[in-house]
Structure formats: structure tokens, C-alpha cells
Image (tube, rainbow, N blue to C red):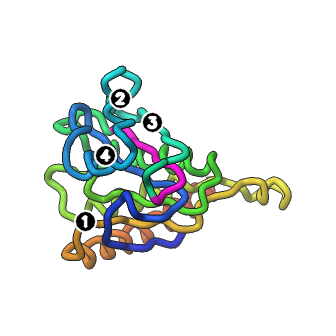
Amino acid sequence: MEFVVKRGAPARLKCGCLVAGVYEGKSKKGVLAEIDDAIAGVLRQAVRSDEFKGSVGQLLQVSPAVGLGAQRLIFVGLGQESKADGEVLRKAVGSALQKAKDARAADVALVFDSFDLRRTSVAERAQILAEGVLLGDYSFDRYQTDEETKKVTTPQSATILLGSTKDEAEVKTGIAAANAICRGVIIARDLV
């Protein structure tokens, strides 16, 4: 999977699937508020009706994402911010990627600022998100026929969308580390 690092407003980014992380009780702040305003308050309504709380692993898909440049939007629950760790973010991104694959999205974009994690550097957080994408995209297909393999459409690229360019170098460092680690993990999975 190819990674692209961009700076910009999530509401304007044209992509197959935009993914944003939501902590419990934090859906009205920062970049999430901007995205929600662009989609006419769909997230606020889902939270108010208890359809979506931001619990760990919970997904809310908005399709079509009217008001956004993205074709679809996935909010992924991260649970309580005080209890979140790298594994929670990694699994959340992986499950959102699976949902994007099921929807046959050509590409995905992660709203970096929505996946904030205490006590981690920008590079560590970027590595965690990239690992979630790479491991979420993995499937053992060695023994599948060409026809079976062709039926599965996976996103060809993942964009890490930043609010500012000051973190771009650190994000690229984190992505490079994730690529190296995940190549080894995937080789090991294929051998088992």
C-alpha cells in the first residue's frame, strides 16, 4: 500500500473513504466538529440517539458523505481517551480499513488529528496508524485462484491528512518504521 502525507481540511479532501477517530464524549471538539458541520450534524445526531457513542471498535458509516469531498465517511470509536493505547488505535484503523474494503473504496484517508494519543510522539502515532492500515489490509491469498483474488478490491493508497505541515517529517518517519515492521509481520504470517 502506498502512503501519502497531505495537509488540508478533511471536508474538502477528495477520496474514496475518509476515516476519523472518535473518543467517547469528544465528538464535539476540533476537527470532528468541522467534519460534523460539513455533514449537517450526522455525528451529533448519532451520539444524541445513542446510535454511536465512540466505544472501542464501534463504527458509524456515512454514505454518501454529502457535504464532503469524500465518497464515504467512517467514524471509528476509540473508547475512553484515558484508557486508549496504541493497540486500540491500531485495531480501530484496521477495522475501518476492512469496512472501506467491503465498500470497495479506491483509497482511504485518515484524519491524523482525530487519532490523538497521550504520551506518544507524532512519529509513534503515525507508525501506529500506518501499522493499522497495513495489517488491516493483510489477507492470506496464496492459495486463492486469480478469479477469487480479482473479486476483492482493496484501497490502493492511504493518505495521512495533517492539520499543519510542521509534523510532516515525523509522520513520514513513522510510516517508514511501520512499513519495515509490517513487512516482517506479513512474512511471518505467510509462513505460519
Residue range of the region highlighted in magenta in the rendering: 69-77
The residue under label 2 is 45
> In the rendered picture of this protein, how many numbered marks are placed on residues?
4
Residue extending furthest top? 49
- Badges 1 and 4: C-beta atoms under 8 Å apart? no
Q: Could you say which is closer to the camera, residue 81 or residue 18? A: 18
Q: Is residue 166 magenta?
A: no
Residue 107 place in picture, x, y as percent: 55, 62
- Badges 3 and 1: C-beta atoms under 8 Å apart? no
Instruction: Residue at 56% x, 47% y: name it.
Output: 98
Q: Is residue 73 magenta?
A: yes
Structural distance between the alpha carbons of marks 2 and 3: 12 Å
The residue under label 3 is 60
Q: Which mark is residue 37?
A: 4
Tag nearer the camera, 2 or 1: 2
- The majority secondary structure of the magenta stretch comes to strand
Q: Element at badge 1?
A: loop
Image quarter where the N terminus lies is bottom right
Residue 29 left/right relative to 53 = left
Residue 89 left/right relative to 30 = right
The type of residue carrying mark 2 is Gln
The type of residue carrying mark 3 is Leu
User: Dot 1: few (<14), some (14–19), or many (≥20) neighbours within 10 Å?
Assistant: some
Instruction: Residue at 52% x, 49% y: name it.
Output: 72
The type of residue carrying mark 1 is Gly
Structural distance between the alpha carbons of marks 2 and 4: 11 Å
Q: Earlier in the sequence, mark 2 or mark 3?
A: 2
The residue under label 1 is 163
Q: Element at badge 2?
A: helix
